[in-house]
């Protein structure tokens, strides 16, 4: 309670002085999004699992709880956060995961961060504590503000706690590898996607398609037999999927700026300058572009991704890149107006993470 | 029940004339004989004759209607098939109902990307029927799926018996195209897995027609499992049944369906469907596995051993698809069966943490005595969504009022144990007072602010779902936060 009061005081002080606040957990994703501004509002004092009932498939924890603590508690019960969130650093917190809204390799089969959100408690720009959603699976009382908060980059307020749906870990997993061209890989992934197969992750990079199968023993074994390909040993397979999730794979170590292209899975090979990696059954493409990210270059990338029905994010700028390209896809004017009104409703003094997302 | 108000004939004439001047004759209904069928939705106890009904045939016509209503300050109530159970499509006496009935075309079926683009008036089941040739289907299956529309599903965030494994509407809709009250077309979500900016799609789904009019929806289709089997297990008491559900989940199984019925429900449906239910059991659990044939065998064996060790008194496993459908038929026909044994029934929709089930069922049993009415319980056990069916006879003086009070007491109990007043039917008009029990003033204000972000003139289904301060004061209940009564100075009755 004492923490809550001091956080409220910081918010009220910021609102009256007009000095912005930069909501921060472990700082593992400081590099993501627009420029950082304001005094740090540290969430790590809000730490700890409040309630975890494995048979209810729900965990509730304070927003500054380290992600490693959550994952360890779940692993003990053979459960997991099915959206496989990236940590991007030792200090990642649950609140940071929810605010960034980033999911890992399992996204296409299991769902994204927002799909597992059940409830959140928010402190808004007036210091009011608001509770949305709850700890139950189905809840349609009031608008689903807790899901709106997922991926909102702290723009609407300080979350105090989150309730998230968890799932059992799959009984069996197997990872298979195939030599394949980009075009064939996109076609194959979409073909598999239309069949009842236990594919839980996929990645094409450098002429190799890697697929992970997860589920009941019989289903995985049968798929392994029918797919063929080269099977990876479990330690190598786990290391590979972790290197995608944490972006430590060689692909991400190349110099240049990293773009995240979110497109319909059936989008053909995108002809763009730079190297590409495909994930999520074709729905997420990574693009590594050498050199700085100028607005003109960003505009060209965005135009080509938009034509495919998707959008592009300047995920990580190159080192020493002082290019002027905006991080996120510009919003349509009517959508931008709704954003402005929502922001004004929850954060009337415009103090929370201004410019980080919009 | 709210009192019905007769639409003002002069105003009706003015609004209908303005609409008719801009739209084909067949799109606008204003004669009470034509508008009477729209006076209620699935919650038939609440009725209100609308002033005018519009049946647009295109997105352009929707924009025209919205423009005229905005100009003339006429409130709008969107309506799909009218199967909703919370009065969300209840008309407003000086308002226009926009029915999506004529926007019933499947625009594109895209098997390669496992998506379908449909107009809002397309029926839920029609999507799965059209996708079947590709081995695909649309997963959310509310019990009204033969009739209910995808636009209505978006408004209510509808679920069904398979949502523990396959998710709700919010998990299965990729994109909606929306006409705003300001007369613009916006797209929320995308045909990729995410869209830039705040996740407005998540807040739009389940917003009960209060944020915009849906003109097109892209849904996700999923591959049809090759096989499915269901276990029917009997339990001597509901606590053992409830614990068995927890044990199935603890064993790492996510069943494709996990449903429970109490003895009253089983006895109510058995003569009606002849499903072979054990009518002596205190609770019956249906537990379904789907997937490849091998996967289903493995999972059924696993479920069976868990249910046996959890104390099931009898277990039957479906041996054919016909038998599987028969086991399900009772559960799926619980509502009509209630209508068969009782002149009227009132269906509630609370969700609770599953571990509190025994406590809530005991509480409901006590209320049966307090309110002098019977109640049958069916339960989406996997996700804690309880549907108590309160049986009553509206022709007996006072019974409807007692049923409503019984229902409100059940919802208050759901909130007390950490649950919610509605899992999938929506707040609509029916549960608007119970919102005062679940949310604080500041939270309700936040909901109003969300509404205003989309609907500045406050014309879209304006009297539903979110109660005003006055309404909560009249209801005499408001959630108290931290032991401090909000608005302590306000008179209360």
Image (tube, coloured by chain):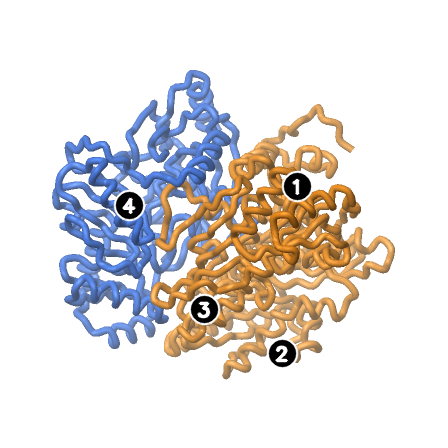
Chain colours: A blue, B orange
Residue A88: name its quadrant: top left
Labelled disc at residue A312: 4
Of the two numbered discs 2 and 1 on the same chain, state the one appearing first in sequence: 1
Judged from the image, the secondary structure of the residue bearing numbered disc 3 is strand
Judged from the image, the secondary structure of the residue bearing numbered disc 1 is loop
Mark 2 to mark 4: distance in Å?
54 Å
Residue B286, compared with residue A112, is above or below; it is below
Mark 3 to mark 2: distance in Å?
26 Å
Of the two numbered discs 1 and 3 on the same chain, state the one appearing first in sequence: 1
Judged from the image, the secondary structure of the residue bearing numbered disc 4 is strand
Q: What residue does disc 3 label?
A: B137
Q: Position of residue B312 (x, y in %)?
A: 55, 72
Residue A309, compared with residue B134, is above or below; it is above
Query: Mark 3 near mark 2, Cβ–Cβ under 8 Å?
Result: no
Closer to us: mark 2 or mark 4?
Answer: 4
Closer to us: mark 4 or mark 1?
Answer: 1
Q: Can residue B365 be seen here?
A: no
Labelled disc at residue B275: 2
């Amino acid at each position: 309670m004492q923490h809550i009061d001091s956080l409220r005081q910081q918010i009220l002080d910021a609102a009256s002085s007009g000095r912005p606040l930069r909501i921060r957990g472990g700082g593992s994703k400081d590099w993501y999004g627009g420029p950082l501004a304001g005094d740090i509002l540290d969430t790590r004092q809000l730490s700890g699992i409040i309630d975890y009932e494995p048979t209810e498939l729900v965990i509730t924890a304070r927003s500054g709880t380290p992600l490693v603590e959550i994952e360890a508690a779940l692993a003990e019960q053979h459960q997991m956060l099915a959206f496989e969130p990236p940590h991007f650093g030792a200090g990642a917190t649950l609140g940071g995961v929810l605010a960034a809204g980033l999911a890992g390799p399992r996204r296409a089969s299991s769902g994204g961060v927002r799909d597992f959100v059940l409830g959140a408690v928010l402190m808004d720009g007036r210091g009011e504590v608001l509770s949305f959603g709850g700890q139950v699976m189905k809840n349609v009382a009031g608008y689903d503000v807790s899901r709106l908060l997922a991926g909102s980059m702290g723009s609407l307020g300080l979350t105090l706690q989150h309730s998230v749906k968890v799932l059992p870990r799959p009984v069996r997993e197997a990872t298979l590898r195939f030599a394949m061209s980009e075009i064939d890989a996109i076609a194959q992934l979409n073909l598999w996607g239309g069949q009842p197969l236990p594919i839980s992750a996929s990645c094409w990079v450098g002429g190799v398609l890697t697929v992970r199968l997860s589920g009941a023993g019989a289903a995985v074994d049968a798929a392994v037999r029918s797919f063929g390909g080269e099977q990876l040993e479990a330690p190598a397979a786990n290391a590979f999927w972790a290197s995608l999730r944490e972006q430590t794979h060689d692909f991400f170590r190349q110099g240049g700026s990293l773009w995240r292209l979110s497109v319909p899975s059936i989008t053909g090979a995108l002809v763009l300058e730079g190297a590409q990696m495909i994930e999520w059954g074709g729905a997420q493409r990574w693009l590594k572009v050498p050199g700085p990210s100028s607005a003109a270059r960003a505009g060209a990338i965005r135009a080509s991704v938009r034509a495919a029905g998707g959008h592009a994010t300047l995920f990580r700028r190159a080192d020493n890149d002082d290019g002027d390209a905006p991080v996120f896809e510009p919003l349509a004017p009517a959508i931008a107006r709704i954003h402005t009104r929502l922001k004004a409703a929850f954060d009337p003094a415009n103090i929370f993470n201004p410019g980080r997302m919009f | 029940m709210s009192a019905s108000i007769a639409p003002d004939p002069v105003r009706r004439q003015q609004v209908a004339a303005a609409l008719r001047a801009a739209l084909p004759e067949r799109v606008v209904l204003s004669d009470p004989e034509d508008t009477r069928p729209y006076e209620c939705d699935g919650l038939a106890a609440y009725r209100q004759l609308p002033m005018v009904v519009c049946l647009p045939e295109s997105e352009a016509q929707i924009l025209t209607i919205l423009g005229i209503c905005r100009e003339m300050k006429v409130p709008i109530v969107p309506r799909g098939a009218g199967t909703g159970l919370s009065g969300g499509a209840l008309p407003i006496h000086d308002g226009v109902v926009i029915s999506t009935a004529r926007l019933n075309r499947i625009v594109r079926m895209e098997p390669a990307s496992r998506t379908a683009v449909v107009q809002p008036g397309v029926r839920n089941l029609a999507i799965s029927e059209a996708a079947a040739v590709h081995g695909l289907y649309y997963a959310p299956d509310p019990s009204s799926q033969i009739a209910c529309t995808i636009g209505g599903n978006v408004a209510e965030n509808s679920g069904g018996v398979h949502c523990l494994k396959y998710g709700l509407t919010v998990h299965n809709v990729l994109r909606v195209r929306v006409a705003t009250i300001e007369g613009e077309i916006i797209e929320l979500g995308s045909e990729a897995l995410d869209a830039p900016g705040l996740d407005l799609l998540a807040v739009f789904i389940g917003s009960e027609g209060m944020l915009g009019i849906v003109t097109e929806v892209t849904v996700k289709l999923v591959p049809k499992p090759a096989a499915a089997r269901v276990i029917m297990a009997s339990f001597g008491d509901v606590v053992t049944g409830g614990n068995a559900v927890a044990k199935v989940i603890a064993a790492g199984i996510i069943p494709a369906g996990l449903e429970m019925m109490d003895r009253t429900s089983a006895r109510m449906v058995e003569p009606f469907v002849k499903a072979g239910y054990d009518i002596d059991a205190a609770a019956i659990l249906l537990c379904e596995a789907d997937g490849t044939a091998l996967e289903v065998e493995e999972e059924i064996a696993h479920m069976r051993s868990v249910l046996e060790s959890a104390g099931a008194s009898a277990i039957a496993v479906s041996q054919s698809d016909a038998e599987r459908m028969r086991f399900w038929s009772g559960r799926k026909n619980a509502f009509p069966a209630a209508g068969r044994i009782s002149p009227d029934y009132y269906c509630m929709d609370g969700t609770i943490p599953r571990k509190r089930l025994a406590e809530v069922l005991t509480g409901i049993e006590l209320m049966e005595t307090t309110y002098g009415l019977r109640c049958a319980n069916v339960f989406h056990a996997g996700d804690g969504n309880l549907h108590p069916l309160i049986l009553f006879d509206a022709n007996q003086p006072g019974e409807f009022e007692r049923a409503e009070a019984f229902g409100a007491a059940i919802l208050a109990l759901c909130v007390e144990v950490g649950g919610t007043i509605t899992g999938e039917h929506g707040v609509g008009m029916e549960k608007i007072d119970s919102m005062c029990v679940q949310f604080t003033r500041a939270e309700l204000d936040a909901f109003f602010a969300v509404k205003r972000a989309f609907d500045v003139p406050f014309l879209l289904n304006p009297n539903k779902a979110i109660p005003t301060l006055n309404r909560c004061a009249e209801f005499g209940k408001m959630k108290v936060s931290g032991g401090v009564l909000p608005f302590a100075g306000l008179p209360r009755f």
